[in-house]
Image: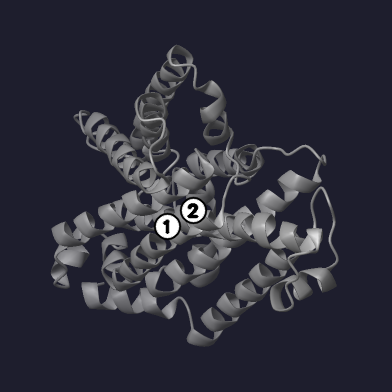
């Protein structure tokens, strides 16, 4: 089968009607989950009150204040984080043909948290915009070290070897972060990012990260066709005229931006970028023109539901969403590793 025939087979895996149904269904589920997440929590609020807070806001009502100033930014932050992690994982899996790729497993999240530790230790009053920029740098640092360590092997990079390198580098950067936290007594400040939580998200945070998010997602959509070709193999992509070096560089920048954004909001949460792309790929095939929109929607859905579960399992206490997602992610990872790292 030549390159053109392989590409046609990939495009046939999702019929437009089926893709539209899956995306529409996911959007409706996401909308419903957002409404429930705003309504439920330590203090349950009726959906009628949520509706009134949106369209008939009364600043004198405490429930309206809770909805507008606390729950709305938190839930929107959860959706943004889920989309960032899921799209970055999809791009990494397509670009590297590594089905175990995820920003948390390959050192990006640990690198971002390490830079956050440095920020809190040496620049404690740094504005949030600069914290995001340092998160980008940390994510790039983590990824660079992981790929550098993984490339030292004579047999090259394999999915399992890359994950092992990611685990080692993540452990190293995590230990350095904890050492900085202990020495400079900033453990309380970093505890939020270690555990994974969205409770501190504010409208100011959303105003800063939203332009970066929209830019990164738009760039990811423009790369959907080249990433589809790369997922078929570098030789196929080159044979069809793809400038693979440029595509990989652009995709890497997008991945760093998305991972840095997510970590700056929620902390070191893993497995979202592993789980969601595989599930979307299973339903929608291997064409990234469908996979990327699907991961945007279903990644947001996963984290919104995880945040909702974290708040309602044992109110008024909250569980870290990173721990809840890991309950799904670890068995999923073991399943993929057992089947040899193949795509679901």
Residue 122 picture quarter: top left
Cβ atoms under marks 1 and 2 closer than 8 Å: yes
Tell which residue pokes out farthest to the bottom in this image: 17
Closer to us: 175 or 133: 133
Q: Is 225 on the left or on the right of 36, as rendered?
A: left
User: Outermost residue toward the front?
Assistant: 60
Q: Please tell me how crowded label 2 is: few (under 14), some (14-19), or many (20+) other residues with Cα within 10 Å.
A: some
Q: Is residue 68 left or right of residue 272?
A: right
> Which secondary structure, mark 1?
helix
| Quadrant placement of the N terminus | bottom left
In the image, 257: left or right of 102? left
Cα gap from disc 1 to disc 2, whole angstroms: 5 Å
Label of residue 205 in the image: 2
In-front residue for pair 25/185 = 185
Is residue 118 in sight in this rendering? yes
Task: Please tell me whether residue 217 is drawn above or below residue 184 in the rendered image.
Answer: below
Residue 273 position (above or below residue 179)? below
Residue at left offset 52%, top offset 79%? 19
**How many numbered marks are there?**
2
State the image coordinates of residue 199 (x, y, percent, origin top left).
Answer: 63, 45
Q: Name the spot of residue 110 as percent of width and height, x first.
A: 41, 33
**Residue bearing mark 1:** 208
Between residues 20 and 257, which one lies in front from this camera angle? 257
The residue shown at (39%, 74%) is 289
Q: Residues within 10 Å of mark 1 (few under 14, many from 20)?
A: some
Label 2 sits on a secondary structure element that is helix
Q: Quadrant of residue 65?
A: bottom right
């Amino acid at each position: 089968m030549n390159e053109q025939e392989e590409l046609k087979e990939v495009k046939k895996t999702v019929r437009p009607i089926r893709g539209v149904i899956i995306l529409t269904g996911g959007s409706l589920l996401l909308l419903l989950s957002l409404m429930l997440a705003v309504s439920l929590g330590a203090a349950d609020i009726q959906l009628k009150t949520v509706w009134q807070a949106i369209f008939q806001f009364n600043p004198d009502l405490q429930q309206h204040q809770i909805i507008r100033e606390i729950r709305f930014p938190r839930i929107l932050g959860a959706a943004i984080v889920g989309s960032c992690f899921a799209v970055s994982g999809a791009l990494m899996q397509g670009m590297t043909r590594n089905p175990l790729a995820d920003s948390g497993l390959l050192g990006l999240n640990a690198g971002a948290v390490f830079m956050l530790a440095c920020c809190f230790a040496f620049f404690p009053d740094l504005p949030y915009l600069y914290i995001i920029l340092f998160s980008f740098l940390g994510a790039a640092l983590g990824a660079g070290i992981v790929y550098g360590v993984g490339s030292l092997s004579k047999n090259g990079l394999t999915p399992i070897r890359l994950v092992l390198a990611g685990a080692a580098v993540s452990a190293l950067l995590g230990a350095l972060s904890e050492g900085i936290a202990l020495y400079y007594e900033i453990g309380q400040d970093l505890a939020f990012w270690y555990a994974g939580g969205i409770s501190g998200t504010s409208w100011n945070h959303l105003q800063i990260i939203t332009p970066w998010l929209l830019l990164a997602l738009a760039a990811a959509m423009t790369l959907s066709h080249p990433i589809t070709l790369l997922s078929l193999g570098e030789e196929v992509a080159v044979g069809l005229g793809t400038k693979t070096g440029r595509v990989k560089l652009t995709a890497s920048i997008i991945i760093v931006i998305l991972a840095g954004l997510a970590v700056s909001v929620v902390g070191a949460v893993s497995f979202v970028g592993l789980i969601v792309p595989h599930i979307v790929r299973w339903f929608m095939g291997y064409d990234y023109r469908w996979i990327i929109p699907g991961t945007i929607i279903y990644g947001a859905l996963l984290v919104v539901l995880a945040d909702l579960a974290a708040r309602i399992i044992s109110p008024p206490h909250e569980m870290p969403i990173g721990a809840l997602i890991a309950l799904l992610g670890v068995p999923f990872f073991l399943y993929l590793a057992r089947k040899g790292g193949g795509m679901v």
